[in-house]
């Protein structure tokens, strides 16, 4: 297969010598020589892209903690929940922790820039924070003794797995 390449991107007067394209995944490099491109991921990454929304949450002239207020809010709420749990109020503490993760999901959804709260893509962060927060809240509500939330089919499933 023969193909002509235009190294400068101009009109027909800028056409350089013809290059040979060896296969469908060959492409000319900057000098016009064919280079095999591949869809495989490189063995070593040279750079990483910032997650969508991973910029500063406040202006660059603000002090460092103010620039990262969304992640500090979520971590502060988780810390308060852990402290409450350590003070032997298990259900309330785990509800606060689950609520902190749900707050992180809402912040990630609503704010265009959340600083270090952005870990992956917006969708992945929302699903992860929201899913984990929801599971923690549901488990806290179903915890024994005296569960606040009872799901009947879970009790039946437990009878099949545990014998008296």
Image (spheres, rainbow, N blue to C red):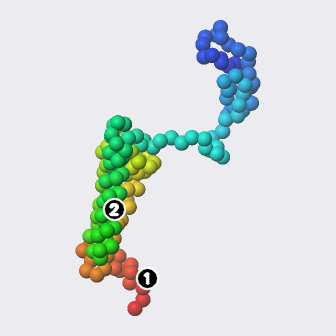
Q: In the picture, residue 112 is in which quadrant?
A: top left
Return the mark for residue 78: 2
Mark count: 2
| Residue 50 pos. (x, y %) | 47, 42
Q: Residue furthest top?
A: 13
On the image, the x and y values in percent for residue 105 come to: 34, 53
Q: Where is residue 141 shown, x and y percent of the image?
A: 28, 71
Vertical placement of residue 140 versus 6, above or below = below
Q: In percent of the image, x 45 and y 48: which residue is there?
A: 120
Pointer 1 residue: 161
Asked whether 132 or 3 is in front, the reply is: 132
Answer yes or no: is residue 123 visible: no
- Using the rendered view, name the quadrant where residue 152 is placed: bottom left
Whether residue 148 sits left or right of residue 41 in the image: it is left
Viewer-nearest of discs 2 and 1 = 2
Q: CA distance from mark 2 to mark 1?
A: 33 Å
Q: Callout 1: few (<14), some (14-19), or many (20+) C-alpha neighbours within 10 Å?
A: few
Which of the two discs, 2 and 1, labels the residue nearer the N terminus?
A: 2
Which quadrant, please, contains the N terminus?
Answer: top right
Mark number displayed over residue 53: none
User: Quick one: SS at disc 2?
Assistant: helix
Say which element carries label 1: helix
- Which residue is drawn at the image coordinates 41% and 48% (left, top)? 116
Residue 125 position (above or below residue 26): below
The residue furthest bottom is 164
Res. 76 visible in picture:
yes
């Amino acid at each position: 297969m023969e193909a002509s390449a235009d190294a400068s991107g101009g009109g027909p007067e800028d056409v350089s010598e013809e290059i040979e394209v060896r296969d469908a995944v060959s492409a000319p490099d900057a000098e016009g020589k064919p280079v095999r491109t591949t869809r495989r991921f490189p063995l070593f990454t040279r750079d990483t892209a910032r997650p969508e929304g991973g910029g500063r949450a406040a202006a660059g002239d603000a002090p460092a903690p103010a620039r990262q207020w969304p992640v500090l809010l979520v971590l502060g709420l988780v810390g308060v929940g852990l402290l409450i749990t350590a003070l032997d109020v298990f259900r309330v503490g785990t509800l606060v922790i689950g609520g902190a993760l749900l707050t992180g999901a809402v912040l990630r959804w609503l704010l265009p820039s959340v600083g270090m709260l952005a870990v992956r893509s917006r969708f992945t962060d929302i699903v992860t924070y929201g899913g984990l927060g929801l599971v923690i809240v549901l488990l806290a509500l179903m915890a024994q003794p005296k569960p606040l939330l009872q799901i009947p089919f879970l009790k039946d499933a437990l009878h099949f797995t545990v014998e008296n």
